[in-house]
Amino acid sequence: MTFRILALTACLLSVPGARGPGGQPGPALSITFIDVEGGQATLFVTAGGESMLVDAGYPGFNDRDADRIAAEARRAGLTRIDFMVVTHYHLDHVGGVPALAARMPIRTFVDHGPSVEKGARPDALFESYLAVRQKGRHMQVGPGHRLPVSGLDARVVASGGEVITGPLVPAPSDNPLCRNFIPKDDDPGENARSVGMVIGYGRFRLLDLGDLTWNKEHSLACPRNLVGPVDVYLTTHHGLASSGPAALVHAVRPRVAVMNNGATKGGSPDAWRIVRSSPGLEDFWQLHYASEAGPDHNVAEAFIANTDESTAHAIRITAYQDGSFVVTNARNGQTRTYD
């Protein structure tokens, strides 16, 4: 009898997503932070197989980023992307969309509306995206919108230069961290218009603000924290010092932070210190070793997916509806469970 029980338990645990950490039953959400060398490409796949991709990295480089995304999509069993969220129209976020669309169908395109940046290069980049977007459905979203992704609660908290005006969860009347906030110059370009989202799956919550800039993030945190606590924070703007004020980062109190930096892009020491000192932070993961930041401003090697630009390993999260989740470094198999 004991043997039969143990055998049955082993069979159940061998089924992907059958049980979460601590033996909690339930389906899982898969999140993959794909290495696009300092751009963004984050793939969400629900237990029901619905997919959402946030940004698609760079163009060029022999379609490097589109190939990496397509490979991760195939690994997840996908034959299409259901929702393609373009946070803003910069080369490292929207540039890879046309090449990806040539590799697999994209059903719905989500963005903040027209680009505010003009000139030969910005116009060409935006027009190449529009040529692909017209082949699918289009959603222009603003603060407060929910994306109709089956199995996810994907709420837009920033878009088109505006942010939500009310808290997503009950918030105290004042955020004490706002007292020490020092504003920076306003950004009139696309970064400040980024589509930012809180992505929920049961009790699990992830914050992705694209490249939203310092003062706009302040509007989400001050005078009240409108976002609420999160489990995972994808560092804003690849960990550049023009984003990620402590008034927001420390207010949302992430248990885990993931930095989608490149070897020579993002991962600035000032931004790194703010994230690393966030109250309640248990672990910090990086897609790349930030070569210019030095050992004092990089996490331990076990938590870095790529130690140089010769590899393209991902960071993966498996999240459960009870709020527990598992983070894995695809380079070395380093895995941490957060109950």
Image (spheres, rainbow, N blue to C red):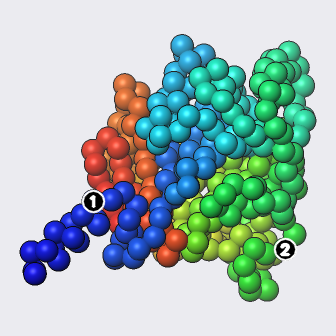
Position above or below: 284 against 52: below
Q: Residue 46's spot in the image, x, y percent? A: 55, 55
Position above or below: 332 against 74: below
The reply to whether residue 47 is visible in this rendering is yes
Q: Nearer the viewer, mark 1 or mark 2?
A: 1
Position of 154 with respect to 302 (left or right) is right
Q: Which residue corresponds to the image point at 79% horizontal and 33% vertical from the top-left?
A: 136
Q: Nearer the viewer, residue 43 or 285?
A: 43
> Dot 1, how many residues are within 10 Å of its Cα: few (below 14), some (14-19), or many (20+)?
few
Residue position for label 1? 14
Q: Earlier in the sequence, mark 1 or mark 2?
A: 1
Position above or below: 154 against 41: below
Q: Residue 197's spot in the image, x, y percent? A: 71, 57
Going by the numbered disc 1, the residue's amino acid type is Ser
Q: Which residue corresponds to the image point at 57% horizontal and 26% vertical from the top-left?
A: 66
Residue position for label 2? 166
Position of 278 with respect to 136 (left or right) is left
